[in-house]
Amino acid sequence: MTTTAEDLLQRLPRLSDEQLKQKYLSSVRWREVIAQMLHRVDEEAQALRVVRLALEANLSVGIKLVGAVKPAFQAQAVGLVATWEIPETYRILLLGMTRSEQAIPALLDALNSAQVRRSVPAAIAKIATEGAVAALEQALHHQDADVRGNTVDALAKLGTETAVAALLPALSDADSSVRWRAINVLGEVGSEAVVPSLLLFLFDEDAYAREKASEALGKIGSEQITPALLIFLNDEEAAVREKATEALGKIGSQAASGELLSSLSDQDAGVREKAAEALGKTGSQTVVPSLVQLWHREDPQNWDEQKCETLKKETEEDSLQVSTKVIEALGNIGGEAAVEALLRGLRDEGQDNYLSSSIAQALGNFPSETVVEALLEALNHPSPNVSGRAAQALGIIGTDSAVLALISALKRRQLAVSGRAAQALGKMGSEAAVPFLCEALDYQDRMGWSAAIALGEIASAEAIPALSQALHHEDFGVGWNAAIALGNIGSTEAVPALSQVLNQEDSNLAWRAAKALGMIGGEDATEALLGAMSDQRGCVVGNAAEGLGEIGDEAAVPALLQALHSTEPTVRFKAAEALRKIGAADSLPQLWTVLLNTPDSDRFSMLLFSVICDISHRFR
């Protein structure tokens, strides 16, 4: 018979402390029923008794139950947490986890403690109420700049209109690092309401503030900021001009095309490159003729003679780099004129090979029959780099008509060609290429690496025997990639071969084998990884723990909890992360025990606390 909250409420006075702890409070699974019951408890002493016992039995459960008692009792329930005998660092974080506004006064008091005050803003943010926002507004006036900076991050995490509005005073903070953080997070928040405040920073004396403001405005991506950003294309600091140019690219404003074309003649190489990238993002067909003319060093008809001379002089030394960026821009803009210019450039026998490879790459954006024909022709280009980029572009387009030609390119055994042909065949998922890619596993000069990766992308069971054998390849990179490829294929047929290399001296191979077993999953894979958990070498145990985390089978929890006591930090960290992924509620009590016996200054302690929070959150 299912026990309901009402049933438990009736039994509560008759239950001893030990009965409550052992049967109900030690497991997260009862928390919902107990929480519902606490809403009905009218006696303060009984309500606090349940919370106190829960804190003793399972701290995660107790923290969550603080917010379940009636509002009239919450201050007293929070007081139990505030006076709990645990390190102050954890107490602050736990107060936030109660999600009760009654915890706010204690958290604000903690701002007076040098040891924990920097953790207070994040704890307040967990409460996530308007009262929490008001408390964070107070923290913005703290004398410690780090506290104010962390408060900025906390308000940004809340992300409500009220929280964003509360952030604005930080823009005028006396500490420059706080101002920069405020600018940055306001860009991440992405609210157009903050645009006027950020625009003021474009006139700040601090060049870095102007740079960060330009970057933040670009993240918001509002057309209304385009005119202001255009002004800062002429800023005296190159870094500011570069960020303003990048921001215009993110906005994709066609209205900025003319100014961006002018920025291609900027004296700073970074600005010139960002200008070309930005023009590509505008998608404006009107700039195509000027870009083509610039590429071929012709005088754009809409520029005066002085501008053209300046452009030629300033870009002469890095003309190749500028031309490459122009080609990329044409590839991003597309359209008949851009494609025609790119095809003409690819077929130009006098074209620089570096630029030809960039052209081939750009043409991968256009899956037309004409482009495919040109790329197939470029597969036979005398330059391996051009041929390889053509193969890469054909893989992106994904046309079946290119498979045979790409297999032929694979057999050329030139790294720049064969490696990219293998990548293309893998991206296309060509089953017909599997036998040839299996053969290519033995190609030298890292070509076998690409073949193994491609076989993993195709994920054909036909490749399992060859990949299993390749685990022992003399070229370590082939073995590494073969392990991951077997994981991608996901067949239990590969488990025996992967299990054999779990204890290899090559720790990178063993790690990938464990990861692959985690990707495959199943009883056999779990058994193999659990067996490796008893190995004497930390690297093997750590790898096995990571693989068990990928599988997510609760049968691994006891072994992983044991690994938390390892003397090797890597094993402890990987075991904790695996327990996070599995998310077993019954692991919480032991996790708390380990945490409370770990120095709170230890980096591992913060990881454990994070794991506990994540697991607890799943059972809210």
Image: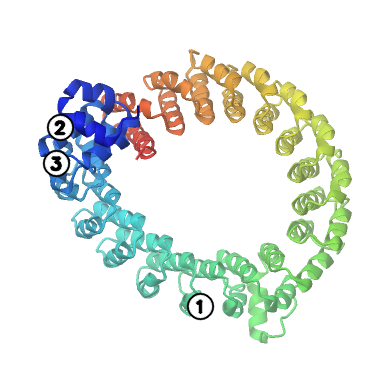
Give residue 547's quadrant in the image.
top right
What's the residue at 72%, 85% (across, down)? 301
What's the residue at 38%, 63% (across, down)? 186
Secondary element type, mark 1: helix
What's the residue at 25%, 36% (across, down)? 6
Kindly report the distance in space between the C-alpha atoms of the residues bearing marks 3 and 2. Answer: 12 Å
How crowded pointer 1 is (Cα within 10 Å; few <14, some 14-19, many 20+) is rated as: some
Give the position of the C terminus as an image quadrant.
top left
Disc 3 designates what residue? 42
User: Residue 482 location in percent, x, y?
Assistant: 69, 29
Q: Is residue 45 left or right of residue 159?
A: left
Disc 1 designates what residue? 230
How crowded pointer 3 is (Cα within 10 Å; few <14, some 14-19, many 20+) is rated as: few
Q: Is residue 434 visible?
A: yes
Disc 2 designates what residue? 49
Q: Is residue 560 above or below residue 600?
A: above
Kindly report the distance in space between the C-alpha atoms of the residues bearing marks 2 and 1. Answer: 65 Å
User: Residue 550 location in percent, x, y?
Assistant: 53, 30
Earlier-in-chain disc, 1 versus 3:
3
Q: How is the image coloured?
A: rainbow
- Residue type of the residue flagged with mark 3: Asp
Whether the residues at callouts 3 and 2 have beta carbons within 8 Å, the answer is no
Q: Nearer the viewer, mark 3 or mark 2?
A: 3
Q: Is residue 312 above or below residue 42?
A: below
What's the residue at 26%, 28% (across, down)? 25
Q: Nearer the viewer, residue 279 or 615?
A: 615
Q: Is residue 2 above or below residue 381?
A: above
Give the position of the N terminus as an image quadrant.
top left
Q: Is residue 30 above or below residue 146?
A: above
Q: Nearer the viewer, mark 1 or mark 3?
A: 3
